[in-house]
Amino acid sequence: MTERKANAVGINHVALEVDDIDAALAFYRRFLDFEVRNHSDSITFIYFGDQFINFSLGRVQEPDNVHHFGISVDGKELVRETLIEMGVELIGSRFLGFLDPWGNRIEITTYTNIQYP
């Protein structure tokens, strides 16, 4: 019997734990443009087209040193400049990486760095 599988077509969303939903919105709004949906004190969704980040109240783990996700932008250097102005410590690598105030590791990239089959 031939094994049938669904084709993965992308990542729909990422869930991040934060200690303060409004502070998370303020932090990410400083360098990203997005639409807010379903905002409450304990959960909020920020959309980039059909993809989104789910901010949930209650960070319990230590900062991430390896686990991360990437956000593709159309202005990577603008994000770099803004993060530096914000006083965010950039993680030294070939990627534009940083920890948000809750220890979530983020990498900023562009679609020119995305590898397609």
Image (cartoon, rainbow, N blue to C red):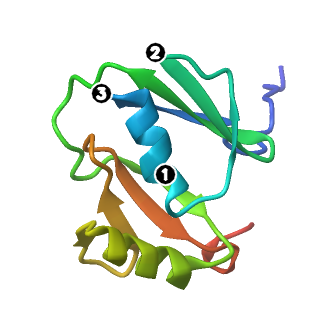
The percent position of residue 97, horizontal first and vertical second, equals 36, 67
Judge whether 67 appears above or below 62 on screen.
below
Between the residue at mark 2 and the residue at mark 3, the CA separation in whole angstroms equals 9 Å
Q: Which residue is mark 1?
A: 28
**Label 1: few (<14), some (14–19) or many (≥20) C-alpha neighbours in 10 Å:** few
**Residue drawn at x 67%, y 21% as measured from the top left:** 38
Q: Secondary structure at mark 2?
A: loop
Which circle's residue, 3 or 1, is located before the other in the chain? 3
The percent position of residue 72, horizontal first and vertical second, equals 62, 64
**Residue drawn at x 25%, y 44% as measured from the top left:** 103
Q: Which residue is mark 2?
A: 42
The percent position of residue 28, horizontal first and vertical second, equals 49, 51
Judge whether 106 appears above or below 111 on screen.
above
**Label 3: few (<14), some (14–19) or many (≥20) C-alpha neighbours in 10 Å:** some
Label number found at residue 19: 3
**Residue drawn at x 40%, y 75% as measured from the top left:** 95
Say if mark 2 contacts mark 3, CB within 8 Å.
no
